[in-house]
Amino acid sequence: MSQRAGWFAWLIFMIGALYFILPLFGTFVFSLQKVRGSLGFSAYEAAFANPDFLRTFLFSSLIAALTIVTSLALIVPTAFWVNLRMPRWRGVVEFITLLPFVIPAIVLVFGIIRTFGKPVTIFGIPLLPSLLNTELSTNIVLIAAYTVLSLPYMYRATDNGLRAMDVRTLAEAAQSLGASWFTVLMRVILPNLRTALLSGALLTFAIVIGEYTIAAFLARPMFGPYLQLQVRNRAYEAAALTIVAFALTWLAMGVIDLITRQRATPVTGGR
Amino acid sequence: MATTLPAAPRRRFSWNWLGLVPFFVFSFLFIFLPSASLFVDSFQNQNGQFTLDNIAGLFEPPIPASYLLSVQISLTTALMGGLLGFFMAYALTVGNLPRWLRPITLTFAGVASNFAGVPLAFAFIATLGQVGFLTVLLRNAFGWNLYTTGFSLYSFLGLSLAYMYFQFPLMLLIMIPAIEGLKREWREAAENLGASTAQYWLRVGLPVLMPSLLGTMLLLFGNAFGAYATAYGLTGGNLQLITIQLGAQMRGDVLRNPNLGYAMALGMVVIMAVCISGYIWLQRLSERWLK
């Protein structure tokens, strides 16, 4: 076996590398050309100075943070409980967490609008009032929808983390010292899951911050729809914001790489 | 969750299931109910009576053409992205490229496979659009005007190029561990028996990798099939993909019958379900040898 790379390996690598870099480089160069005839950062200044940018960006960050909290609160106890007490339910729970791969975002939001746009009833029994007629309840639905999107990554990250430690022994040791289930979860399991959960959380952040489909159809003032508006009206600012969005994705993935030594492949769906 | 340890005498009835209630309630409300409502409404007319008209409506223009276009673009980008991603994974593992290239490439692939939607669409507009960076560069430096050759970014080809940006990195990410799972002993055994490199790959390497290769391509297919934001951001609805058609339907633009929209969504879920089941099945097959 030869030890030097062949021309074919280099050629393929170069094609791939160019594919990665060219669109980013193109966008970056484009973003510097707001002032005709010179290169500069005025598109960035203009983009950041727009109060709508700050408003939508902060709103998206808030929604992303709340989604992460919801997803953690839902997934960690569930995965913990499945591992410890309900191993027979593992298949069912895993199956449910994979469903968001089968249901595209646009179909999910369609179903959500259909379901929560009117009072929810099951066989004529009223269950919930319409959730899409106040801002607060629509935001709750938005967070729930993003939590659904985060299920596959969050569950997989948590489950991998739990399998890597001896949950039963840790739980029994803590309980024999008088800890309640809540204490076991918060002070024994969670600290041991730090890296796994952080990578799940960062991935969720990267997905939510630029998400367009669900935000647009629920008419929430998120960064994704705002960026789409800028694409139509102000090309240079849009280029600057695209670079910002890319940098954020890069930051999230970079931190995941740093904290998880071995390769956790962040696999998400197309949007 | 204030139950005690199993050391206590066995009770007849276990309250363990209570721990899973929040998860199941959430899934019921936000996954099951929305899907079920689309399913039920697909078989109802606007007065709530049972009908198969909506399903029949899926076979009337322009809807079959939209499904077909979506299938075509998903198939094209899954194949092309799959090939490029596979060869790149090959180059980075067996191809003996310098080792330091790998972590950088993998991080980049992680970013690129997550870089979809409006920002991706705009990155391609800024690069290959009428006044895009590459378009202008080719025109000024080589005197070659892309747009006189009939190329358009807002076409099937253009959208395929954009989808490729998240397709091949995903393939790369999944194929690298698979290729690394090929045991060195297999190669040595093949070589001891006098096999050439080509023979080893054709008779041993590729057959072992095949389920994983095909399975991941199915995943890529589903990945492209359900994508909406990238297509909408790039073509603004010019290209009548099924997701675009569904989006227009939801905005109340096109078709008169909303229940037909539910049937369209149902059709998409069916296609996605077939893809993902195929992926899971093939992944299981490949685990027989790799892992």
Image: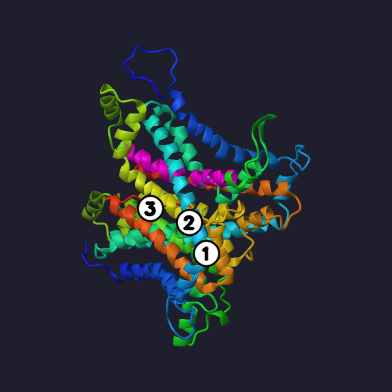
Quadrant placement of the C terminus of chain B: top left
The chain identifier of the residue carrying mark 3 reads B
**Residues at discs 2 and 3 both on one chain:** no
Seen from the viewer's position, the closer of residues A124 and B215 is: A124
Q: Position of residue A256 (x, y in %)?
A: 33, 52
The chain identifier of the residue carrying mark 1 reads A
Range of the magenta residues?
A137-162
Q: Position of residue A148 (x, y in %)?
A: 50, 43
Q: How is the image coloured?
A: rainbow
Q: Quadrant of residue B53?
A: top right
Specify the label residue A51 is tagged with: 1
Seen from the viewer's position, the closer of residues A8 and A185 is: A185
Q: Nearer the viewer, mark 2 or mark 3?
A: 2
Depicted B128 relative to depicted B78: above or below:
below
- Circle 3 residue: B174
Residue at the (43%, 12%) spot, across then down: B12
Depicted A175 relative to depicted B191: above or below:
above
Q: How many marks?
A: 3
Depicted B142 relative to depicted A92: above or below:
below
Q: Nearer the viewer, mark 3 or mark 1?
A: 1
Seen from the viewer's position, the closer of residues B44 and B222 is: B44
The amino acid pointed to by label 2 is Leu
- Circle 2 residue: A58
The amino acid pointed to by label 3 is Ile
Residue at the (36%, 29%) spot, across then down: A182
Q: CA distance from mark 2 to mark 3?
A: 34 Å
Can the viewer see residue B225?
Answer: yes
